[in-house]
Amino acid sequence: MRGHSTIPLSSAWNSWSTRPAELVYRPLGFKVTPVLYSSRLRQTSLIEPRKDTVRFGRHTIGNRLIELETELAETAISFSASAVDPFVLRGSWSASAVSEWGTRFWLTLAVSAESGELVRYDHDAQVALIEIDRRFLAVATADAPIQVTAHDSIEALRADFEANGYFYTATRGDQAPVLGLRFNMEMMRTGAYGLAIADSASLAIEKARAAVAAKPADIAPLHSGRFDGALDAVRDIVGWNTIWDPVNQRAYTAVTRIWNLGDFAVWYNDQTFAALLSSVFDIDLARQNMAVALAGATPQGNVACIVTSNDAWVDRSQPPTGALVAWLCYQRSGERSVLEATYEALARNQRWWRQNRDPDGVGLISCGTSDVGAGLYKGTVFGARNETGMDNSATHDEAIYDPATRTLSTFDLGLNCALATDAEMLSKIATVLGHEADAAEFAALAARSRELIGTELWDEERGVFANRQRKGGFVRSLSPTSFYPLVCGAASQAQAERLLGHLGDPATFAGPFPLPNATRDDAAFSENVYWRGRIWPNVNYMVWLGLRRYGFDAEATTLARNSYDLFMQSWREMRIAAENYNATTGEAMDQGDTDPFYIWAGLLPLMASEETIGFDAWRGWTLTNDGQDVSAGPILSPFGPVRVDVVDGVLQLRKGERMVLSTDRRGRLSHVAFDEGSFTCVLGKSDAEAGFLTLHNLDVPDVVAARLGDRPLVAMAVEGGVRFDLGGAAPGARLTVWHLPKDSKTAA
């Protein structure tokens, strides 16, 4: 099997397989697979997270730096790999602890090609060579291997170790589909190797040797100061979970690289969040993740709930978060192509929900399972609950499956809020794309949904939004979806204020670890199983979005801080990014229904990072100066990769090393936009009346005009730019500066 020729150069060498220590040159299918062997256990390890101890380290988006640690029989080994250039990689290992005599613990670099070409070992040059399609891979090592063994497969190499041990020479050879370059921890407790691709064997060997001698790569932190390490965590979670789908021949950011339901698995809702998280650094990867999510679009109109190599749940979907994510990706990148590529499937999905999940025609939907496909759980109450993504939530306990309508008996609050938000975002997208009739249609649908949620799903007696029987009263159990009307804008101001009471109530949702997915006074909370009592990152993120939308900035910051603290409790030492968390202790792995490296765990540190620099579906690009020192970035923006620093109370925005903007005004700037010939932003609440904003790399003669709200501003010359006095500005005032375009200055 050949590789894939359209992989970006920055990712060609990468940890593509479910074996994270295995390095694959994806365009041609070259592989170098570390294999560990313990004589004490008489056992080998391919360093597979489901079977072996693995601690994921740093992983850039691409191959600039890849780090992990593993353990076998209490011998601990760390691995590192870094790109020297797109075709050359340097790898290394180091044993930090050896629990048996080092001569009896072996590390083998298994060199092979997915297409089965023979690997040759040149003893004079001390390199392994493979040729595929007239291109050569050379593997050079700092120390010559103790011996080189020849095998038909990696499994045969493992079987040789496990049957014959290390003190065995009959499998020595210098040509085979798999060559094992064998080292032990007595003689090579640390080691390095170079991998190089070239169009001649001699050049590949030269480059591989040079890589061995190269200085190991390192990278600067992405986030320090306030919410230290938040962006680094997002990057590492995306980097490690971006793998190769061998069935569909595509790269994608999986829900987790640790397990799959077959050779690949895509959950619609989860995959959209993978796109959101990857967009922080790489819009091309985000675009690919959205394409993977929407590859599950069915002829009926919905996007399948899940699609795996074994099954496809086309009879049901998941909460429609796709339009929200597409819009946020557009906000961050400014790339209209993201919207164009996703719009049709997202629009069809929105209409499908309303045509297929509103059996009474009232404008509110119930979850269900259609009579199509042959997916597991089709036509069952559990299958219907899958559509909410909260399969065993106590909010479903009173729901009854109606075979006649193939829906549950309840209006699901979270699903209706997601549908309303989706319609609102589709209206925004349609406007950008020039689909005026669609924009009006979706705006009307969003408005109607908001109206019905605000009236029909509001329980006045309890002062909270809740699921409701289609032909009866409210269900007893609540979840954080009670706050989702804030996301879609359905709550009146009075309703929103009452919701804050529930948010701060320790008997329900408050506590050092928010937000539990069953209230603390619900019997389901003590079960601590999946959606019955545990904390879910995607839910916290959606509630945080709602608080931001309604201007509850203090409450949003508190939720972001508590979510960050929850995440870091397991991340800092154990590097666990959990699917869900215990709502009492904050533990991640206290029970067996939690994956330890799940993609949407990255939403917890993302919320924290966006408290400084982020992208808001309603307020665009935002920059926040709360006076605390912080350095965050580079991350993607419509202005290119940017970094924000707050130093001594002054926020500084940089593009590369060039200062672009600085301000000492406390609070948030929203709707930030750098256009050709203009700069705009909207001033948020501030605890100080005075303040300045400086645009760097401009001179006073460059400024054509400037206004703050309805009054003109005077540009003042300062070193490196022009400054504007923001004193007396009211929250909500728009600052606009018109200036000569850069090319006009150059021409002049």
Image (cartoon, rainbow, N blue to C red):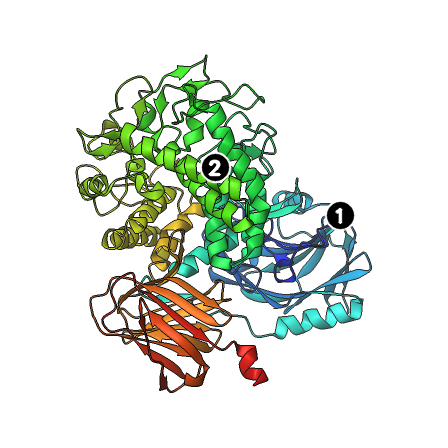
Residue 98 can be seen in this image: no
Residue 9 location, x and y as percent?
A: 65, 62
The crowding category of the residue bearing disc 2, from other C-alpha atoms within 10 Å (few below 14, some 14 to 19, many at least 20), is some
Where residue 94 sits: x, y (%)? 51, 63
Q: Secondary structure at mark 2?
A: helix
Amino acid carrying label 2: it is: Glu
* Disc marking residue 115: 1
- Residue displayed at 51% across by 38% down: 268
- In the image, residue 475 above or below residue 557: above
Tell me: residue 45, above or below residue 358. below
The percent position of residue 230, horizontal first and vertical second, equals 38, 59
Tell me which amino acid carries mark 1: Ser
Residue 345: which disc? none
Neighbour tally class for label 1: few under 14, some 14-19, many 20 plus, Cα within 10 Å? some
**Disc number at residue 441?**
2
- Label 1 and label 2: CA atoms lie apart by 52 Å
- Mark 1 or mark 2, which is nearer to you? 2
Decide if residue 73 is on the left or right side of residue 121.
left
Q: Does 559 sit above or below residue 91?
A: above
In primary-sequence order, the first of circles 1 and 2 is: 1
> At 25% across and 31% down in the image, what residue appears?
458
* Quadrant (top left/top right/bottom left/bottom right) for the N terminus: top right
In the displayed image of the protein, which residue is found farthest to the top? Answer: 404
Q: Position of residue 203 (x, y in %)?
A: 76, 71
Q: Quadrant of the C terminus?
A: bottom right
Residue nearer the viewer, 587 or 565: 565
Q: Secondary structure at mark 1?
A: loop
